[in-house]
Amino acid sequence: MSQVGVVRPKRTGPSVPGGRRDRYWELVAEVVTEPGRRAEPTPGTAHDWLLSALAAEMGTPPPTSV
């Protein structure tokens, strides 16, 4: 299939500001966790932990929410 004439917009940053994305993952954890149990890490919280760990390893400040 030819891609001639297909124009795709360039992504210039995150599609959702960080604060809203963080709140989304908090709500996901609340919804999927059984009452009385501790929330399991969601993909969003795991991503945040990874970014923080990488920043610490590199000696740079952790990324901030947009």
Image: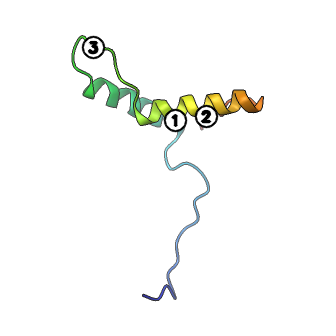
Residue type for callout 2: Leu
Q: Residues within 10 Å of mark 2 (few under 14, many from 20)?
A: some
The residue at the far top in this view is 36
Q: Residues within 10 Å of mark 1 (few under 14, many from 20)?
A: few
What residue sits 34% from the left and 20% below the top? 39
Q: Residues within 10 Å of mark 3 (few under 14, many from 20)?
A: few
Q: Position of residue 54 (x, y in %)?
A: 66, 33
Residue type for callout 3: Arg
Q: What's the distance in space between the residues labelled 2 and 1, CA to CA?
A: 6 Å
Residue type for callout 1: His
What residue sits 63% from the left and 28% below the top? 53
Drawn side of residue 31 relative to residue 63, left or right? left
Provide the secondary structure element on which disc 3 rests: loop
- Looking at marks 2 and 3 on the same chain, the residue that comes earlier in the sequence is marked by 3
Residue 22 tag number: none
Q: What's the distance in space between the residues labelled 1 and 3, CA to CA?
A: 22 Å
Q: Position of residue 55 (x, y in %)?
A: 69, 31
Q: Position of residue 15 (x, y in %)?
A: 50, 50
Query: Which residue is denoted by mark 3 in the rendering?
Result: 37
What residue sits 49% from the left and 85% below the top? 3
Instruction: Please identify the quarter of the rendering in which residue 10 is found.
Output: bottom right
Query: Which residue is denoted by mark 1 in the rendering?
Result: 47
What residue sits 33% from the left and 31% below the top? 28
Q: Are marks 2 and 1 in contact (CB under 8 Å)?
A: yes
Q: Position of residue 44 (x, y in %)?
A: 45, 35
Instruction: Give above or below for 1 relative to 59.
Output: below
Which of the pair 15/59 is nearer the observer?
59
- Looking at marks 1 and 3 on the same chain, the residue that comes earlier in the sequence is marked by 3
Q: Are marks 2 and 3 in contact (CB under 8 Å)?
A: no
- Give the quarter of the figure containing the N terminus: bottom left
Q: Are marks 1 and 3 in contact (CB under 8 Å)?
A: no
Instruction: Please identify the quarter of the rendering in which residue 34 is found.
Output: top left
